[in-house]
Image: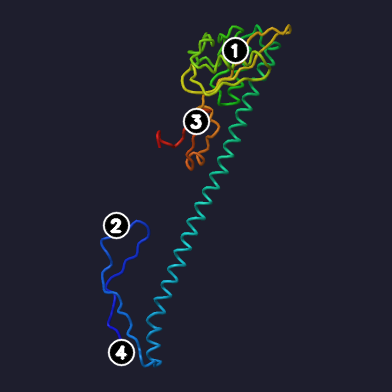
Amino acid sequence: MGSQSRYTGFRMSMGDDSQSQGPVRGRAPAEPQRDTSGSWEGRRWWLSFWLPMLFFLFSTAVLLFSWRAFLHSEASAKEMETRVTTEQVKLRLEAWMQTRLAVVEQMGSHWVRDFQGHPEEFRKAAGDLIDLYPGFQALNWIDESWFIRITVPEAGNEAALGKDLHRHQSPGVPASLERATGRPGISLTPVISLLQGGRGIASYRRVRGSDGKILGYINGVFRIDTLVDACLAEKGLRDRFHFQILDENGSVAYSHGIREGG
């Protein structure tokens, strides 16, 4: 008693089998004939035929389960890494902005003592601070009538010099200046179209004389791409992650590694 069946071909693939050249060819193994005698030889033949097949099927199931578990674990690890990195980037950007807004505050608090009537001293101090804290588009002095009278650096900011901010194309600018006029501290615009070109954020800090009269405003200007590129400059971060920064309306204010519409 016996069987003459054999395999004439075998192919296994994982995932998309579009590259396969055709189905596996060959005859399936013939079903073992039932041994009615109940002899030991019959039972041994049955075991020798089916045990390897059962072992193969069990091993394949274990391997597939292990592979799926590995893929799930890898995906979970990447998701966790992305979440942690996102939170770290958010905290870093917030810290960068706070540090640079502190520069605006410092310039405002020192205006009367150090810079009133001394524009060159203002230009020098502003230039030194911009070199020390990269990410500024400009540090400006705005007079009490909302005209930009001094801009540092002048190169790249010529379009802003002398402009009346009552007439700014972004309504967030006069609204922010109104807030700065009525209260101490720094007032921020939403993301706006800058006079110098590009998109960014402007900050305003009022300056008052000893009599309480408003003398003008310190204006810190930040272009989004300049600020973010300086803050997130590590090659490892930029190579491994794609990211976007959205404004308060959900529009993309900055994008790295993501194609428009993708």
Q: Is label 2 in contact with label 4 (beta carbons under 8 Å)?
A: no
Q: Secondary structure at mark 3?
A: loop
> Depth-wise, is mark 1 or mark 2 nearer the camera?
2
* Residue identifier under label 1: 141
Residue under the image location 35 percent in, 62 percent down: 13
Say above or below: 34 vs 141. Answer: below
First along the sequence among labels 3 and 2: 2
* Residue identifier under label 4: 1
Residue 123 horizontal/vertical position (percent):
60, 14
- For residue 82, say whether it is visible: yes
Residue type pointed to by label 3 = Gly
First along the sequence among labels 4 and 3: 4
Q: Looking at the figure, which quarter contains the N terminus?
A: bottom left
Residue type pointed to by label 1 = Trp
**Disc 3/disc 2 C-alpha distance (Å):** 43 Å
First along the sequence among labels 1 and 3: 1
* Residue identifier under label 3: 250
Q: Give the color scheme: rainbow, by chain, secondary structure or one colour.
A: rainbow
The residue lying toward the viewer, choosing from 83 and 124, is 83
**Disc 2/disc 4 C-alpha distance (Å):** 41 Å
Residue 60 horizontal/vertical position (percent):
42, 68
Residue type pointed to by label 2 = Gln
> Depth-wise, is mark 4 or mark 1 nearer the camera?
4
Q: Secondary structure at mark 2?
A: loop
Residue under the image location 40 percent in, 34 percent down: 261
Q: For residue 19, which numbered disc appears in the image?
A: 2
